[in-house]
Image (cartoon, helix red, strand yellow):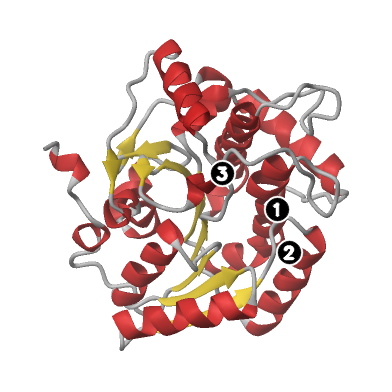
Amino acid sequence: MNEDLTITTDDVLSGVDMSGKVVLITGGTTGLGKESARALGAAGATVIITARSEEKGQVAVAQLSELVPQGDFSFEVMELSSLESVRSFTDRFLATHDRLDVLLANAGIMAVPYGKTNDGFELQFGTNHLGHFVLVNRLLPLLKATAPSRIVNLSSAGHFASDILWDDPNFDSTDYSKMEAYGQSKTANILFTVELERRYGDIGVHSWAVHPGMVMTDLARSFTKDDFGDLASRAKKSGMKMPTLVNVDVGASTQVWACARAEALENPGAYLADRAVAQPSDYANDPEAAKRLWELSEQLVGESFPES
């Protein structure tokens, strides 16, 4: 087996001391987010996860505390598909925390049927990108005050399915394709990373976008047999091989690496896979497109975020 597909989060964090570091992870109740929380908590970090409900948050924190008895875990309720919920959460977080070393924007949805967020955005674009856009920017004062700090945005090789639909990002008039909508949202995660690094890298707030690989989680719960066939066809057309399915502790290793390892600082702003720099599509790596997306996102959410 390829050695890259056996390296786990615990391998990545071996010898790393995260004591005194505060880490916020969106979507930390299951899958990659929960495994990242466990591993970073085991390395000594104070970990706050977000959950979509009190019940899910309580269950996840109880499980994490059982796995890492010495860990410091807590949760906050936040719904990324509601900007009101995101803004309420950030207000609470800023009022109760004096530092934030790492923000892992992990939560997301994949290839779901057509729907709209509470604010009227296409569900995948609104949840995966716009919710995190508002979250990260509202917490930037704390990230800047804690610098050096890190922002890690979970993307995917699925971004090859679509560029940003600049004239119709919410599929108001375009025929809906769940894979193109997912691809657009994952392209947005990379472009957001590019612009974050341009704006704030010089002051010590660094950002990365991460492709975790194909991981055994419930993210693809909306996938049908036809969807998997569509995914395989798109991968073939783009010259990519379908990735090998891996366990969650392997899948989360790259995002944890970006959160904690000094080596990640050698390539800030990069798109990562298997704990190394990878090559995204040309449209996802375009600095001008990154600026354009930032401006479009500000218009859509009705909120502006200055560079300094």
In the figure, 79 relative to 130: above or below?
Answer: below
Quick one: label 2 or label 3, which is nearer the N terminus? 2
Closest to the observer, 303 or 32: 32
- The kind of residue on which mark 3 rests is Ser
Residue at 42% across, 59% down: 31
Quick one: label 1 or label 2, which is nearer the N terminus? 2
Q: Nearer the viewer, mark 2 or mark 3?
A: 3
- The kind of residue on which mark 2 rests is Val
Task: Tally the numbered discs.
Answer: 3
Closest to the observer, 97 or 74: 74
Residue tagged 3 = 222
Residue tagged 2 = 86
Q: CA distance from mark 2 to mark 3?
A: 24 Å
Residue 260: where, in percent of width, then height? 35, 60
Which labelled disc corresponds to residue 131? Answer: 1
Residue at 38% across, 52% down: 258
Q: Is residue 96 shown to the viewer in this render?
A: yes
- The kind of residue on which mark 1 rests is Gly
